[in-house]
Amino acid sequence: MNDDKEKKLISLMAVRRHDAFWQRQEKKILAAAAGRPSHRKAWLLAPAAALAALLFFTARPQTPAPAPENLVSTAFLEHLDMLDDMDVLEAVPENEL
Amino acid sequence: METEKKTGPEGLEGKDPENAFALLIEEHQRLVYAVALRLTGNTTAAEDITQETFIAAWKHLKDFRGESSLKTWLLRIAANKARSYWRWKKLRNWVGLGKGEGAEDAPALEDLLPDRAGDRPEQAALAADLERRVQAAIALLPPRQREVAVLRAQELTMAEIASALGMAEGTVKAHWFEARKKLEVSLGEYL
């Protein structure tokens, strides 16, 4: 592919929206930031859930199975909230940690 | 294309926090949203990813030491969130909850409308059709090629893409080479 085609391809893949769209989005982000914690989309907890599942399975041999009523404890939920930051932590280069 | 690092952490110092946050969003939201949309093909998910990316970045800005650019850091967060989105989709499909969901959701037509009212119906229809075709072509790419192509489409350099995705520059070049060959086939009529 030549440079001209590459430029056209890049231009085709650009995302174009109205100014009103960007203004609306900015307001939504600011409102969400001010009003936290808001409802979370389930998929935003995916990395936390994956790690929680990993911790659960790796911890199983050492600990007896918890009673069903204790499975979702407050501590577990707090843990999930903390792990929600994984996307950010993963984004920090190792030499910056 | 977004201008590199106009709003770096040092550029936000001394500003009222709310204004500084608004400035950060204004500067980078187009880039972050475009990447999120092209990586997920879903406008609702793209809006959520954009929102979460900025909130998370703002919360952790003090941890950011500026060894990479703010732009690539934001994009890396957004790309990680897009990966989470796909993991979640996969999990839902695996447990049978994803059946019947539309593969993609289309942008609202009014968001695609041009500013000049006279051009609206025709141009909006063309824009919507093109949007679908471009998104479909991107969706055909394997995940890593898709990530590289989407960042390249934002006119990031190979080095910036490598930094944002945590890949070697040579790997980025190889992925882009393969991706653009496939995109040329899919979108050939527009090139």
Image: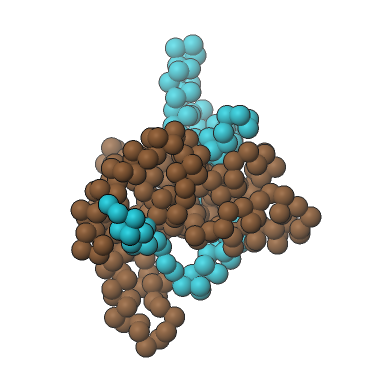
Chain colours: A cyan, B brown
Residue under the image location 61 percent in, 29 percent down: A95
Residue B1 picture location, percent across and down: 49, 60
Q: Residue furthest top?
A: A62
Tally of numbered tags? 0
Q: Nearer the viewer, residue A79 or B122?
A: B122
Residue B8 picture location, percent across and down: 66, 51
Does residue B79 appear left or right of residue B52 in this picture? left
Residue B92, quarter of the rendered image: top left
Residue B179 picture location, percent across and down: 29, 46
Q: Nearer the viewer, residue B139 or B85?
A: B139
Q: Residue furthest bottom?
A: B118
Residue under the image location 56 percent in, 49 percent down: B71
Does residue B13 appear left or right of residue A61 in this picture? right
Q: Nearer the viewer, residue B5 or B100?
A: B5
- Residue B105 seen anywhere in this rendered image of the structure: no
Residue A85 picture location, percent across and down: 57, 39
Residue B45, quarter of the rendered image: bottom left
Residue under the image location 40 percent in, 86 percent down: B117
